[in-house]
């Protein structure tokens, strides 16, 4: 194609290869009319060739310059030229260019659509699917939106193509020559081909996007299903874990029934969850039926849920059967024990006086025969039969219980047989005919009984066997025989020396044997420990079921006071945790030591950390007691006590854990006394020490929680080491404060708490008859503390100097042992530089006013003026000592510790409160003192006292006035006691 450059006056060729359908072989250039009229210059062809060669490429074909149209006819037939060139073909250049441009534009548009579809398809294929449902939903929305846009574009192009095809058909109808019709037909075929390609691309794109959309939807369904499966699997796992926590067997009937109740409750909840699991499985089957692409995974998940449900159902069913069988076994054993108890009480309640008559002996025999007829099946079967019958649920603990019951059964049966033999002999003697024999006076029954007691070695009863096999825990309380209304009571003796059944009476021979046999003694102590442990566990369970569980019972809610609602954790503390520990762990450990009592020390040491649950229980006890006092008269507790048939109220049972804790060390001490092997003695001693340390820790924590008014976090002070009550005098450095402090002859009563990083001074206060607490007074950093071990005048006193003797505390201990213990612990802290450095680095947040005692008139710290710590307090001549109940100098005070814990709610300090004493000076004592305040008006005899004078108190007359001599001035006169209190300083 050529274009005219009007500026230069010659044509310029431009590249048209991209729009020309064929190859170029010859270029014909026809000059315009304006150019034909001008005379060409010799360089015109050269210019043309130069201009032509500066285009994008050099034409490598001949270029012919034509002067006229006639020259053009020599190259092209006139039938192929338009009318513009004086030829015969009717041709409109603009129409042809417009039509040709439309076809080419449509072709380019179709090509762009194809590229867009290909790019969108590649993007969809390469998109990584996220793991979140929200992201998948966003992808579905965005892809669908773009798909609709692409569909709109395709429809627009199709519409454009159909319009172009319609235009071509119109042009074709207007053409008359065949050549022109063939050209138009070719263009129409091109447009139709492009339309067919576009429709094929649309169909392929629709199919691809439909599959992609379905995949996203199925992936979203899979995510939801996986989430439901995971939630369901977690719930089933928790149920399975809870099922495993329920023991397969119990040790008592009550515990086994509680386990069955727990299992039934768990089964009910498991059924609800497994119904939900069936819904999830059904949903998975629906997804699989809809030809989901993750068919194998969905089927696997369904199978896993189904298998999990089957496992839980089977486990619960098996455990229920095991617990049911265990309950049956324990009921039989209980029946056997009850039968033994009834037999023992029957033997004990039969009066020997009645045996001397025929009717009495026959009646006693009848009672024994009736009791034998009521014997349970366990009595008639052998131990092996019972073990074989319950072999599936038999454990070592159950086997030991069966053995113990069999031993008791054999002991009771042996006693019954002996009694029957005696009664038969008595009955036979009385029915013998007495003929031809002179009657003799009947001997005195008392003498008869003394000569031949009913249970004596003469009747063939081995007392050693009876005492070892028939343990006194067969008699679990004080009961009255069913056959006798006698008010006689059977006492159960827990002490070994007094461990003699009242069925037999005292036997010195057996007692001496028991004393010479330590193994038998330890076995009795171990039986006592296990028996009381069982009782303790049963009592805890009865409280938890009879009171704590009833607080959640809707049928009892109308009796529950409002103050108790949602307060069961306050009232009972962590008693459920204590019960779990003893019933599931510690009782089994003790039973395992039945045959080897000396190993019980290792048992206590192994579970030493578990006993810390008692510390939390004791710390909660004040809150529990306060709540109990508020609601003790509630009908709810009366109804619960009536259901449980308890003679004591709930408050007595809430003290059981504290009482039980104090009994362990007593039993351990008895075992240690009678243990022979040295290694076991060491274990028992360690166990005893650990229990005493636990008691001390519990007691200290009980005191610590009673501290009030401390402005900081008391936990930052570290571990509490010691605590106790002392008499304290305080001396400050500044004279103005020192005067008032030294005027106090009577000491202040302070309760001291020694921590790793500080020493606390508190004052005991009693608000009412129930509650006591410690009012915080001052706090000393251990990093600034020094001590003076000896003070002249009293071996129980020592000094605590603070901040370079800025403040000196003169402390008087109740005993020398307490003083030594405190000094040793303080020295340990001061001798450990690591703790001191830790104290400094931790920068305990102690306010400035912590160093001031509330009894002082100033908030600043002062001390004695230039005096040494060896000087005694003004009150050293008549010290006031208040002995606390709870101080911990050494483990030797174990009994005091235990007694203090059992009565922990009572006061453990001196009952004297110094709230009034601190404001009233103590009586004056004759002696020498130094004057601290200059005064000329202090004496009625005009004696002048200057600061520093030494005066001597001679005597006190009947009116209370003191005769005083000023040694420094040689004057003598009478002075009122209140004036002396004001001016006197330290003693000389």
Image (cartoon, grey):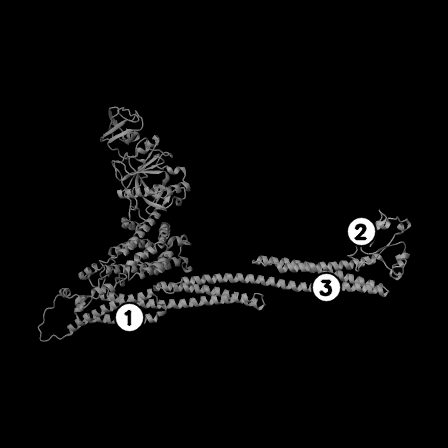
Q: Spatial distance from mark 3 to mark 1, Cα to Cα?
A: 100 Å
Q: Badge 1: few (under 14), some or many (20 or more) residues near its Cα, within 10 Å?
A: many
Q: Residue 778, can we see it?
A: no
Give the quadrant of the N terminus. bottom right
Q: Is residue 360 above or below residue 119?
A: below
Q: Of tags 1 and 2, which is closer to the observer?
A: 2
Q: Residue 673, can we see it?
A: yes
Q: Which of marks 3 and 1 is nearer the N terminus?
A: 3
Q: Nearer the viewer, residue 28 or 588?
A: 28
What SS does tag 1 mark?
Answer: helix
- Disc 2: which residue: 53
Q: Badge 2: few (under 14), some or many (20 or more) residues near its Cα, within 10 Å?
A: some
- Disc 1: which residue: 379
Q: Which of marks 2 and 3 is nearer the N terminus?
A: 2
Q: Residue 778's spot in the image, x, y percent?
A: 36, 39
* Residue appearing at x 25%, y 71% in the figure: 370
Q: Which of marks 1 and 2 is nearer the N terminus?
A: 2
Q: Badge 3: few (under 14), some or many (20 or more) residues near its Cα, within 10 Å?
A: some
Q: Nearer the viewer, residue 497 or 266?
A: 497
Q: Residue 823's spot in the image, x, y percent?
A: 30, 42
What SS does tag 3 mark?
Answer: helix
Q: Of tags 2 and 3, which is closer to the observer?
A: 2
Give the quadrant of the C terminus. top left
Q: Is residue 824 above or below residue 458?
A: above
Q: Residue 431's spot in the image, x, y percent?
A: 15, 74
Q: In this view, does 380 lie above or below 480?
A: below
Q: Residue 274's spot in the image, x, y percent?
A: 48, 65
- Horizontally, residue 364 falls left or right of residue 306, namely left
**Numbered circle sitting on residue 197:** 3
Q: Spatial distance from mark 2 to mark 3, Cα to Cα?
A: 41 Å
- Residue 681: which quarter of the image? bottom left
């Amino acid at each position: 194609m050529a274009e005219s450059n009007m500026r230069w006056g010659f044509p310029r060729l431009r590249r048209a290869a991209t729009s020309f359908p064929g190859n170029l072989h010859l270029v014909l250039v026809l000059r315009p009319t304006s150019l034909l009229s001008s005379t060409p210059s010799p360089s015109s062809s050269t210019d043309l060739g130069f201009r032509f060669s500066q285009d994008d490429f050099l034409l490598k074909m001949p270029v012919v310059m034509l002067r006229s149209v006639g020259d053009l006819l020599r190259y092209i037939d006139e039938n192929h030229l338009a009318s513009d060139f004086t030829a015969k073909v009717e041709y409109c250049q603009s129409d042809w260019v417009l039509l040709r441009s439309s076809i080419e534009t449509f072709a380019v548009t179709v090509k762009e659509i194809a590229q867009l579809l290909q790019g969108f398809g590649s993007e969809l294929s390469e998109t990584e699917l996220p793991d979140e449902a929200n992201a998948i939903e966003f992808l579905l929305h965005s892809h669908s939106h773009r798909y609709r846009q692409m569909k709109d574009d395709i429809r627009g192009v199709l519409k454009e193509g159909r319009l172009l095809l319609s235009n071509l058909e119109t042009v074709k109808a207007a053409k008359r020559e065949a050549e022109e019709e063939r050209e138009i037909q070719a263009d129409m075929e091109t447009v139709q081909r492009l339309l067919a390609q576009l429709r094929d691309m649309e169909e392929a794109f629709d199919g691809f996007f439909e599959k992609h959309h379905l995949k996203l939807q199925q992936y979203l369904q899979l995510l939801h299903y996986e989430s439901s499966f995971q939630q369901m699997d977690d719930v089933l796992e928790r149920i399975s874990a809870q099922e495993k926590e329920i023991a397969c067997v119990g040790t008592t009937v009550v515990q086994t029934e509680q386990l069955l109740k727990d299992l039934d409750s768990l089964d009910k909840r498991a059924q609800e969850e497994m119904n939900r699991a069936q819904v999830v499985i059904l949903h998975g089957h629906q997804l699989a039926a809809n030809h989901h692409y993750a068919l194998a995974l969905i089927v696997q998940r369904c199978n896993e849920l189904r298998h999990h449900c089957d496992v839980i159902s089977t486990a619960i069913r098996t455990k229920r059967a095991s617990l049911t069988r265990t309950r049956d076994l324990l009921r039989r054993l209980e029946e056997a024990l009850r039968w033994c108890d009834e037999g023992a009480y029957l033997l004990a309640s039969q009066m020997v006086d009645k045996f001397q008559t025929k009717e009495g002996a026959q009646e006693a025999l009848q009672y024994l025969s009736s009791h034998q007829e009521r014997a349970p099946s366990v009595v008639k079967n052998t131990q092996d039969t019972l073990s074989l019958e319950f072999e599936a649920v038999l454990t070592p603990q159950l086997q030991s219980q069966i053995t113990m019951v069999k031993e008791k059964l054999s002991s009771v049966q042996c006693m019954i047989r002996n009694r029957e033999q005696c009664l038969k002999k008595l009955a036979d003697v009385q029915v013998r005919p007495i003929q031809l024999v002179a009657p003799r006076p009947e001997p005195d029954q008392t003498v008869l009984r003394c000569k031949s007691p009913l249970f004596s070695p003469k009747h063939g009863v081995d007392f050693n066997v009876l005492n070892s096999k028939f343990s006194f825990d067969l008699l679990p309380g004080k009961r009255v025989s069913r056959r006798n209304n006698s008010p006689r009571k059977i006492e159960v003796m827990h002490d070994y020396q007094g461990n003699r059944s009242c069925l037999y009476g005292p036997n010195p021979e057996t007692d001496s044997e028991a004393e010479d046999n330590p193994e038998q003694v330890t076995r009795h102590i171990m039986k006592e420990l296990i028996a009381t442990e069982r009782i303790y566990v049963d009592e805890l369970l009865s409280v938890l079921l009879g009171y704590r569980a009833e607080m959640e019972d809707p049928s009892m809610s109308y009796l529950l006071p409002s103050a108790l609602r949602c307060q069961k954790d306050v009232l009972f503390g962590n008693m459920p945790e204590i019960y779990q520990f003893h019933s599931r762990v510690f009782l089994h450990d003790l039973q395992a030591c039945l045959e080897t009592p000396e190993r019980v020390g290792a048992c206590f040491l192994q579970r030493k950390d578990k006993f810390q649950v008692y510390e939390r229980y004791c710390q909660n006890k004040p809150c529990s007691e306060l709540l109990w006092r508020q609601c003790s008269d509630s009908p709810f507790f009366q109804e619960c006590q009536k259901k449980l048939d308890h003679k004591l109220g709930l408050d007595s049972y809430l003290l059981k854990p504290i009482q039980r804790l104090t009994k362990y060390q007593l039993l351990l001490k008895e075992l240690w006394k009678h243990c022979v092997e040295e290694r076991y003695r060491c274990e028992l001693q360690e166990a005893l020490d650990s229990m005493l340390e636990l008691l001390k820790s519990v007691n200290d924590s009980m005191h610590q929680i009673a501290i009030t008014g401390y402005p900081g976090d008391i936990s930052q002070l570290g571990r509490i080491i010691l605590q106790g009550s002392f008499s304290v005098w305080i001396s400050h450095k500044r004279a103005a404060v020192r005067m008032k402090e030294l005027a106090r002859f009577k000491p202040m009563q302070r309760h001291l708490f020694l921590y790793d990083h500080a020493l606390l001074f508190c004052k005991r206060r009693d608000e009412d008859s129930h509650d006591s607490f410690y009012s915080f007074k001052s706090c000393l950093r251990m990093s600034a503390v020094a001590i003076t071990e000896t003070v002249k005048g009293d071996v129980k006193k020592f000094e605590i100097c603070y901040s370079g003797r800025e403040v000196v505390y003169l402390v008087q201990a109740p005993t020398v042992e307490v003083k030594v213990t405190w000094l040793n612990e303080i020295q340990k802290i001061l001798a450990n530089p690591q703790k001191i450095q830790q104290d400094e680095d931790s920068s305990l947040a102690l306010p400035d006013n912590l160093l001031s005692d509330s009894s002082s008139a100033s908030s600043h710290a002062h001390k004695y003026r230039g005096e040494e710590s060896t000087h005694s307090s003004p009150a050293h001549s008549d010290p006031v000592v208040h002995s606390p109940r709870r101080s911990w100098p050494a483990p030797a005070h174990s009994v005091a510790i235990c007694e203090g814990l059992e009565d922990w709610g009572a006061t453990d300090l001196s009952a004297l409160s110094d709230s009034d004493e601190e404001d009233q000076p103590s009586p004056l004592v004759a002696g020498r003192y130094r004057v601290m305040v200059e005064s000329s008006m202090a004496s009625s005899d005009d004696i002048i006292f200057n600061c520093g004078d030494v005066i001597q108190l001679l005597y006190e007359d009947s009116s209370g006035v003191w005769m005083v001599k000023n040694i420094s001035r040689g004057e003598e006169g009478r002075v009122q006691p209140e004036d002396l209190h004001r001016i006197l300083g330290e003693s000389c």
